[in-house]
Structures are given as structure tokens and as C-alpha cells.
Amino acid sequence: MSQTKDPLGVVVQLRQSEGYSCTIQAGNHQLIADEPIPLGGNDAGPAPYQYLKAALGACTAMTIKMYAERKKWPLENAIVSLRHSRDANKNSVFERDIKLLGNLDEEQRQRLLDIADRCPVHKTLSQGASILTKLVD
């Protein structure tokens, strides 16, 4: 299997003595992840599934904007709301609501809805991914 180096790598480590709280180093950006208080965390940052939904929502909005700009369509904003649940077979289900603002006709709106499914994070989640894990020193 051919692999390419990820230029946007991420490093996550537990914050000492702070329950489940983690620091996330993503390039020049430092983030915090935690679990909510009812799950034993301190709620110091978004939970992992909130970051996963945020990744899907951000990628969706960016993909829609890129396409609209290329077509010179009057998109003013794309607002993406997401929910995650599991179905009866315990499979993940992401619900994504997209609100498009701007003077778009119905054909443009439908095309942008179709384009949303082309965002790379959507493709990764819907097609699945392999996760290769190893211990390092």
C-alpha cells in the first residue's frame, strides 16, 4: 500500500493531572480536547466527536465556497450543522444540515448540495479508512 507523508500532521498528548484533557498540536495551532463532566472529563475543550463533526462541517463549507467562487456564484455564506448518532446496527450516522445564504437560484443551490459530498472529509468518512498503529520510542 502506497503512503504519502501527511504535511498537516497532528500530535496529541494527555495533560498531566487533568483527567482526560489533551493538548492537540496541529501545525502552529494548539487546541484542547476533553470529555464532558458527565463522562468524567473537565469539559476543558470540545470532545473528540465534536472535533470530528467540526472537521466534516468545516470541510463541507470550504468545499462549497471554493466551488461557488470558481463559478462566480453569489454565495454569501454556508452554515453547516451536524449531529452524530448510531443506528440499530451500531453504525455511525452523521446528519448534516446545510444552509446556503446568497442570491442563488434553485439549480445553483442543488449543485452546491451535490458538491458538499465531494469534500475530502466526507469522502474519508463515507468510504472508511485504515488506521495503522505502532508503538514508538
Image (cartoon, grey):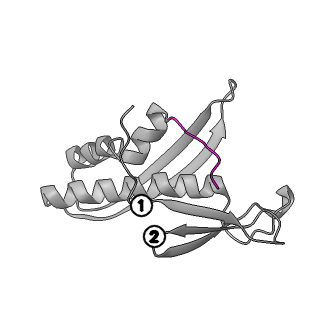
| Residue at 60%, 42% in the rendered image | 133
Count of marks overlaid on the render: 2
| Residue at 13%, 61% in the rendered image | 72
Residue 48 horizontal/vertical position (percent): 65, 55
Question: Dividing the image into 4 quarters, which one contains the N terminus?
Answer: top left
Depth order, front residue of 84/24: 24
Residue 121 vertical position relative to residue 69 in the rendered view, above or below: above
Q: Amino acid at mark 2?
A: Gly
Q: Mark yes or no: residue 99 visible.
A: no
Q: Amino acid at mark 1?
A: Leu
Mark 2–mark 1 distance (CA, rounded to whole Å): 7 Å
Q: Is residue 132 magenta?
A: yes
Question: Magenta stretch: dominant SS?
Answer: loop
Q: Quadrant of residue 91?
A: top right
Residue 122 horizontal/vertical position (percent): 42, 43
| Residue at far front of view | 137
Q: Is residue 96 left or right of residue 115?
A: right
Residue 90 vertical position relative to residue 30 in the rendered view, above or below: above
- For label 2, the crowd category at 10 Å Cα-Cα, with few meaning under 14, some 14 to 19 and many 20 or more, is few
Q: Which residues are magenta?
A: 130-137
Q: Is residue 4 left or right of residue 71?
A: right
Mark number displayed over residue 8: 1
| Residue at 61%, 35% in the rendered image | 92
Labels 2 and 1 touching (C-beta < 8 A): yes
- For label 1, the crowd category at 10 Å Cα-Cα, with few meaning under 14, some 14 to 19 and many 20 or more, is few
Secondary structure of the residue carrying tag 2 is: loop
Q: Is residue 92 magenta?
A: no
| Residue at 67%, 64% in the rendered image | 13
Residue 44 horizontal/vertical position (percent): 73, 72
Mark number displayed over residue 53: none
Q: Quadrant of residue 45?
A: bottom right
- The residue at which mark 2 appears reads as 27
